[in-house]
């Protein structure tokens, strides 16, 4: 992961503006890494009619690329919160362009990262970034995580408001089944997913084992 430091990206982390203007900082980091989010999203707009007919509103096509993706400042906060633990594997459920894999690899160089994203073009761009950074431990897959998706065992699950309430519940129920069986972490980002957990999945926080920030929460299983 030395490439991340050599590129000057880590210098952003020491700059106070990194957290004050997360969108601008994220754009600059993408540019340094060669991640072409805005370009790819513009191309997707041209094909949005056919894509949305297949996948409905879960594509988020037309949304600003920096709004679509979790800003690097939050991802660094998440990685810092996890730093005391031995995270060897992580899965991003709705991975976009794979930013989480890049940041986790900076903190946990041997982490196995698996990201699942609905849109093929985003997957291709993210995997190209991993190849450029020589992150052989990271990979994105085109997947529909709601339908016929097997949720494998990982140390960390990242989930955000990728769809409507019913779709989010499908994933949370799968995680709930695992929560009492093995030791792992959940990062939940967004109002909808955190509200669902608060009101419908108390097992995630009943033992006061949650850590909350403005836009995301960290939950640790009981084992």
Image: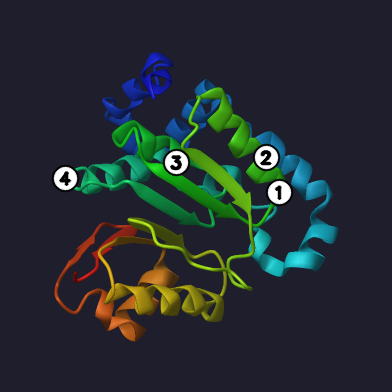
Image quadrant containing the C terminus:
bottom left
Task: Using residue 27 as the reference point, say whether residue 214 is left or right of it.
Answer: left
Q: Position of residue 59 (x, y in %)?
A: 67, 59
Q: Residues within 10 Å of mark 4 (few under 14, many from 20)?
A: few
Height in image: 213 above or below 133? below
Q: Tag 3: Cα neighbours inside 10 Å, few (<14), some, or many (≥20)? A: many
- CB contact under 8 Å: marks 4 and 3: no
Check disc 2 and report the residue beneath it.
124
Q: Which residue is at 57% across, 69% downward?
A: 163
SS for dot 1: helix
Q: Is residue 35 visible?
A: no
Q: Are marks 2 and 1 in contact (CB under 8 Å)?
A: yes
Q: Look at the numbered disc 4 and give the secondary structure of its residue.
A: loop
Left/right of residue 153 with respect to residue 222 in the rendered view: right
Q: Residue at x 60, y 37 (%)?
A: 127
- Relative to residue 63, is residue 200 depicted above or below? below
Distance of label 4 from label 3 (alpha carbons): 18 Å
Q: Marks 2 and 1, how far apart in space?
A: 6 Å
Q: Which mark is residue 84?
A: 4
Q: Pointer 3: what residue?
A: 101
Crowd class of label 1 (few under 14; some 14 to 19; many from 20; radius 10 Å): some
For label 1, the residue is 120
Label pair 3/2, CB-CB below 8 angstroms: no
Mark found first going from the N terminus, 3 or 2: 3
**Could you give the CA–CA distance between mark 1 and mark 4, rounded to whole angstroms?**
34 Å
Label 1 – label 3 distance at C-alpha? 17 Å
Residue 197 bears which disc, if any? none
């Amino acid at each position: 992961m030395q490439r991340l430091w050599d590129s000057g990206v880590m210098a952003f982390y020491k700059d106070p503006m990194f957290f004050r203007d997360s969108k601008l900082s994220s754009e600059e980091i993408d540019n340094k890494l060669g991640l072409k989010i805005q370009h790819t999203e513009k191309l997707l707009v041209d094909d949005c009619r056919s894509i949305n007919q297949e996948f409905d509103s879960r594509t988020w096509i037309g949304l600003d690329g920096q709004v679509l993706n979790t800003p690097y400042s939050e991802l660094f906060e998440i990685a810092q919160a996890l730093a005391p633990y031995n995270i060897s594997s992580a899965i991003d459920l709705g991975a976009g362009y794979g930013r989480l894999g890049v940041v986790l690899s900076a903190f946990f160089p041997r982490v196995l990262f698996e990201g699942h994203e609905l849109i093929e073009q985003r997957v291709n761009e993210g995997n190209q970034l991993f190849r450029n950074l020589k992150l052989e431990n990271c990979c994105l897959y085109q997947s529909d995580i709601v339908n016929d998706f097997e949720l494998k065992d990982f140390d960390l699950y990242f989930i955000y408001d990728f769809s409507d309430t019913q779709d989010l519940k499908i994933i949370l129920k799968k995680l709930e089944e695992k929560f009492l069986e093995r030791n792992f972490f959940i990062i939940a980002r967004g109002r909808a997913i955190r509200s669902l957990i608060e009101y419908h999945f108390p097992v995630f926080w009943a033992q006061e084992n949650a850590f909350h920030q403005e836009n995301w929460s960290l939950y640790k299983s009981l084992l």
